[in-house]
Image: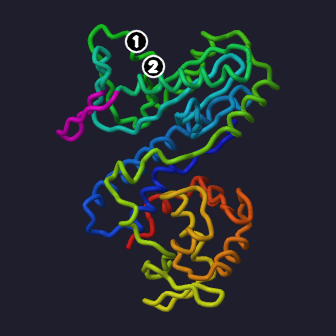
Amino acid sequence: MIVKDRDFPVNLLFLQAIERRLEENHPSMPRVKELMAKQIKGYKGETAIDYPLSILPDQDYQILHSVSIQYQNQNFHIDTLLLTNNFIALLEVKNMGGTIHFDRKFNQLTQTYMGNVKYYQCPIIQVSNQERLLKQWLEQFNFPTIPLTSFVVISNPSCMIQVDPGDKSTNQKVIHGHFLPTKMEQQQAISNKQILSAKEIQKLTRIIIKHHKGKATLTLKQLNINPIELLLGAQCSTCLAFPMKRTHSYWYCLKCNHKSKNAHIPALKDYCLLFSETISNKEAREYLRIPSTNVMKRILTSMELQTIGNTRSINYILYPLINLTSPSNHDIIISNSR
């Protein structure tokens, strides 16, 4: 049974916000678009395992997609987490084509696709590290010790998986998506002792969801983008021009004459993704090009955002504006590009 839906990738939202606000001729724009395509491909790969997961008996599995947890000042992300009475399974999903070769001696992955060869960090090491961090994180809640296991799931059925001669361990950790139900049956046979009660599983599920927080791992610095190079203000949803002008109780586009009452909302979402999860009245005025403190206060107050700080240093919390609910495929591909 799915108890947490898959989130829309925060890194993709971050990149889309950059694409909206960065000049097209900026030297980092090709890299931004390359990473966007990679994020979309990965997201589609994760959704490709939905069908084999749906075959698993609802009463035996609690399925949590897109779990991001902070532990010891670092975030770790799990594509899909399966909770059972007997074991917990972590799934790292890879959407890769062509032929992939697992080199366990040097712990790297080689992909050959359409004549091109690429090298990657071994995903088995990646998911093993996630498993280790999850184990340490769980210890603080005093649950009975339950076996943890992890798998790399290749979601593209056309991908050929190769290993070195004599390698008898990789096929225990790497599977095609369609093999998931069978693999879970095998794991049930291995870990056949009940460790967690139904109430404990429910409690653990609530704790994981409570501590989950999707956060972009990419930064402007990694992409060689100076924050001052990003366009400020509210964007016109009709002609995509920046910035719209606040006039009376609405936003007005100087380029196409479009009017909007809520153009500040997507703009503040971008601010949250690109700059900070909180904003002060002064910061909002500078960002949205609004000179009046009172006008800015009315706009922020009307949004019913939670606040921190006292009256003189009040900050508005923007994170709840970020909707991570899975959008349609149309929304994934199309963003507000200029």
Instruction: Please determine whether, in this image, residue 299 is positioned above or below residue 85.
Output: below
Q: Which residues are magenta?
A: 109-121
Residue at label 1?
A: 169
Q: Are marks 1 and 2 in contact (CB under 8 Å)?
A: yes
Between 61 and 120, the one lying in front of the other is 120
Quadrant where the N terminus sits is top right
The extreme front residue here reads 312
Residue toward you, 179 or 264: 264
**In the image: residue 104, left or right of residue 248:** left
* Tag 1: amino acid: Ser
Q: Residue at x 71, y 32 (%)?
A: 58
Image quadrant where residue 323 sits: bottom right
Q: CA distance from mark 1 to mark 2?
A: 7 Å
* 120 in magenta: yes
What SS does tag 2 mark?
helix
Total numbered labels:
2
Q: Position of residue 37 (x, y in %)?
A: 36, 53
Residue 196 drawn above or below residue 278: above
